[in-house]
Image (cartoon, helix red, strand yellow):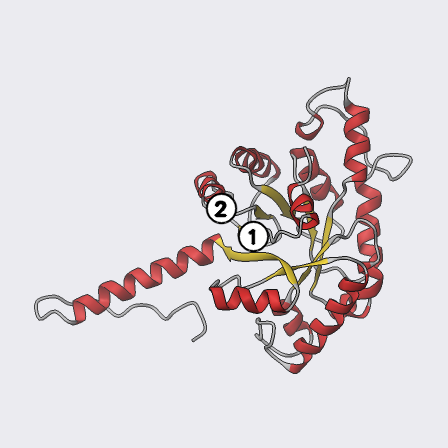
Amino acid sequence: MPNRLTTMIENHEVPIGMQCFTADHALIEVMGRTGLDYVWLDSEHSAINPRALEDAIRTADGVGLATIIRVPEPDDTTSARRALEAGAEAIVIPMVRSAADVTNMVDALTYPPNGRRGICPAYRAAGYALSTFSEYAAESDAGLFLIPMIETVDALAHIEEICALEQVRVIVFASGELSYALGEGANANLHGSEAIRDALVRVKAAAKANGVVLLGGPIIDPTAASCATALEEDIGVLCLGLDVMAFRKICEQAVTAANTAVAASTRFSRPPAPASGFAH
């Protein structure tokens, strides 16, 4: 199957998607039925195991969603390989520090003589078929799609080498994590501090020089204005939410609406709501 994200990017279309920490099949189906193009399934900060991951990818395929998988660690080649074998279209590599972290993944995820990935036809992406395995292996190697996360000081220092790698077609400018790494605290937006603005300029320049697209955007509060800001900053793949955080926001809004109505009543009362989980 052609890589859906690559096809959209080559056609100058802007893919949009959402992070998914629950791997809930109903939520994934809703994502696919409402116009999202990809789902980011997370195994770094969530408890999604290999079996749950494969079933979630099946559901995503059924509603036309491309799947990108964040592995737990930059050197967790086993999780990355299992994600590809389950049918993932791209691997997100967290906490990258240098081009070597990415080339180590390339070596682990390509077959001999290109790399050291083990040969086995008995998994989903290969069609559970020995007869067509050679074709699958060649296509998998040629289409390997790695997405490094630029969220460490070392990655920022080596951004030019990272973007120059053939298998890197998209990078994540992780402004929140990078802000902490730079000692700036919780400045999660693109213009949170001068250090983040300077980092974004350098990352954008390296990406543009190598034909690499930035993935990012307003994860917590996607609006037309915040999406426009992301596009103005050359972010070409938009990430517009995170399932558990989006649900928390809906719950907070519902409680606020109910409490406001009750407060206007002379017959009923309500306990105060917990503090919001979002900055004001």
Quadrant of the frame with the N terminus: top right
Nearer to us in this view, 226 or 69 = 226
Q: Residue furthest top?
A: 131
Q: Residues within 10 Å of mark 2 (few under 14, many from 20)?
A: some
Q: Residues within 10 Å of mark 1 (few under 14, many from 20)?
A: many
Q: CA distance from mark 2 to mark 1?
A: 8 Å
Q: Is residue 120 above or below residue 102?
A: above
Q: Secondary structure at mark 1?
A: strand
Nearer to us in this view, 260 or 234 = 234
Q: Which label belongs to residue 42? A: none
Q: Amino acid at mark 2?
A: Gly
Q: Is residue 153 left or right of residue 72?
A: right
Q: Position of residue 218 (x, y in %)?
A: 53, 64
Disc 2 target residue: 35
Residue at left offset 85%, top offset 62%:
161
Q: Is residue 188 above or below residue 42?
A: below
Disc 1 target residue: 16
Residue at left offset 46%, top offset 54%:
244
Q: Residue furthest left?
A: 267
Q: Position of residue 239 (x, y in %)?
A: 57, 57
Q: Position of residue 51 (x, y in %)?
A: 59, 35
Q: Is residue 173 left or right of residue 245?
A: right
Q: Position of residue 63 (x, y in %)?
A: 51, 36
Q: Is residue 176 above or below residue 195?
A: above
Q: Residue furthest right?
A: 113
